[in-house]
Amino acid sequence: MGEGPIDRRYGFTAPWRRGGPQKDRRMSVEQPLWRALSAYRPLTMVYAVLIFLFERDRFEHPWVAEAFLAFLALWTILTLPRVANAVNCTRRFLVADLAVALTGILLTPLADVHARSVDGPTLPSIWTAGSVLAFAIKGGWRWAAVASSFVAVANLVERGHPSRDTLHNVLLVWVASIAIGYVVEVARASERTLARALEIEAATRERERLARDIHDSVLQVLAMVQRRGTAIGGEAAELGRLAGEQEIALRTLVSSGLVPTVRTSAKSPSAPAGPGPRDLRSLLAPYTGPKVTFAEPGAPVLLEPAAAGELAAAVGAALDNVREHAGRDARAWILVEDWPDEVIVTVRDDGPGIPDGRLAQAEVEGRLGVALSIRGRLRELGGSADLVSVPGQGTEVELRVPRVRGKAER
């Protein structure tokens, strides 16, 4: 499988990374918004200039408006690359851009003395909305609320005694910018969900490809060794039995999609190293075999490393009890249930069961396998271990670990 870099999240070579550098196929739902903003700003700048040219005669100090609009035109043209995408649109630029809009609003009474009495447009006019929309696209509805609030205060100060139309326009900009910011946040969340779904789909396809390759090679060889060893007998029969066990274990790993782990004894399962939650399924998968069936959820069962290791060790202790007391011919089943508030692992066997009073007698005799190896571990995690056994019908051990409590906190 040495065709490309290893995807460490899934433990296989990602199909989109083979044969060359990785290509960025990520779809950006917000990029059309940046393109629209890039077109909106120069158009509204031209609109503000045209309003001034058509109404220049009513300005008492037209040179103030001319100076600001000249700067606004230059600023709009030079900053077009800044509003092309989220990377170029930095926080410093957003603050400076909003400052330009606020300055234009507050300069309006200086250029037009009667601006407060006449409910006309400000110098930047609707160009100001583009500055607020940049905040919304970049940072979501919270940033949009802050920017639109500054614009609202500037408009109220500029008017002095705001009319109903002024309040209406201010409220419209405030609500519209927040709504657009919220839509952007929802779109980003949907984009992340889609990207995650595509990754899972790619992982599933790669797992299916690996399963086909393994089925056509390794599994067939192991099955042949098992048949031939059983037919020859003697030491070859033992070799065939081991090959059969490995075939079953490999089929389980391939079908469940778990990353193979180093197989260890049941009493000391392989505990993952490093920070961050761990998938409990990968710790329990090595316990599977000809006599042990493992049923787990399709999604990762994440626990803190310490909690996952202790829970896996408790499962190993329960399986040790099955082999020791129910016999090597007894079958066992491991069931993992992932609930929002807790993780439940059930270990059941079809052995003869435990006679009444046997556990209490074992504790008196100093045989503390269940008391310490199982219940003690679960007690430290803030969980519980319940054992139900009916003579002649097997034994069932239910291990519960809470997600938010002590060491089991997620």
Image (cartoon, rainbow, N blue to C red):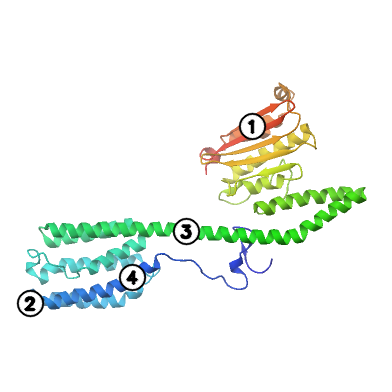
Q: Residues within 10 Å of mark 2 (few under 14, many from 20)?
A: few
Could you tell me how far apart the alpha carbons at marks 2 and 1 are, in whole angstroms?
89 Å
Label 2 vs label 1, nearer the camera: 2
Q: Is residue 288 above or below residue 91?
A: above
> Which residue, given by chain and number where applicable, does mark 2 sit on?
57
Q: Is residue 108 above or below residue 381?
A: below
> Which residue, given by chain and number where applicable, does mark 1 sit on?
375
Label 2 vs label 4, nearer the camera: 4
Could you tell me how far apart the alpha carbons at marks 2 and 3 are, in whole angstroms?
54 Å
> Which residue, given by chain and number where applicable, does mark 4 sit on?
36
Secondary structure, mark 4, is helix
Q: The N terminus lies in which quarter of the figure? A: bottom right
Sooner in the amino-acid sequence: mark 4 or mark 1: 4
**C-beta proximity under 8 Å, tags 3 and 4:** no
Could you tell me how far apart the alpha carbons at marks 1 and 3 are, in whole angstroms?
41 Å
Residue 117 visible to the viewer: yes
Q: Is residue 13 above or below residue 232?
A: below
Q: Residue 284: x and y, percent?
A: 67, 45
**Hey, which quadrant is residue 400 in on the image?**
top right
**C-beta proximity under 8 Å, tags 2 and 1:** no
